[in-house]
Amino acid sequence: MVQTHYRAPSSFRLRKPLRALKLDYARITGEIQAVTLLLRRRKAIDAWAGMQDGFTILVAEDSPDDAKLLEFAIRRAGLQNPVRFVADGYEAIEYLQGNGKFEDRREYPFPKVIISDLKMPRLNGLELLDWLHQHPECKVLPTVLMSGSGLEKDIEKAYQLGANSYFQKPSTLEELTSLMRLLTDYWARSEPPPEMRNCP
């Protein structure tokens, strides 16, 4: 009886112990998952930012320091689209109506999302929501209210007046950046309202 001995070609031999191969597989799988997550986040950011149509965010915030911090968090979250700031609810209405300096829509594009502080001079966040609620053409604008106040009456009133979301202002930059990313993911999955130029 002839015995044959098969010797596997070198290309088929295991060059590493099985444990090492498992570790390599786990590392590669982890890297693939990380890249996939990054691509999904990038897609969500691009979708929400609406780079193709100049997606503008209008922020009503009376504190210059809070305004700068919010803009920094927005950029840190990966959003590069236009952000326009106004000092209170009254100025936000002027912006939406295209009055005065806000008439130039090349410099002050009509927003698709409003982020508003609660406590502001002249016209606060709740009063801005009330104004939007009374104008059917404009109340469709997604509006997010942010405040240091977590009072139940403020939260309830905000939602009664049509706020899409109410958040307490985060205490750290990391938390604020995470909140901006959360909003990114949320609005990326939402259909935007019809195009508008001004509120009547």
Image (cartoon, grey):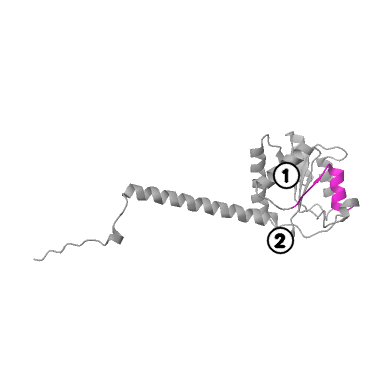
Pick the residue in front: 47 or 143. Answer: 47
Report whether 39 appears left or right of 84. Answer: left
Q: Amino acid at mark 1?
A: Glu
Q: Quadrant of residue 105?
A: bottom right
Camera sees residue 189: no
Where does the magenta region start and end? 82-99
Q: Amino acid at mark 2?
A: Gln
Of the image marks 2 and 1, the number of the one nearer the N terminus: 2
Q: Is residue 32 magenta?
A: no
Q: Which mark is residue 101?
A: none
Residue beneath disc 1: 71
Residue 108 location in percent, x, y? 82, 53
Residue 17 location in percent, x, y? 31, 49
Residue 41 location in percent, x, y? 60, 52
Task: Give the spatial CA distance, label 2 vs label 1.
Answer: 21 Å
Q: Which mark is residue 52?
A: 2
Pick the residue in front: 161 or 92. Answer: 92
The single residue placed furthest to the left in the displayed view is 1
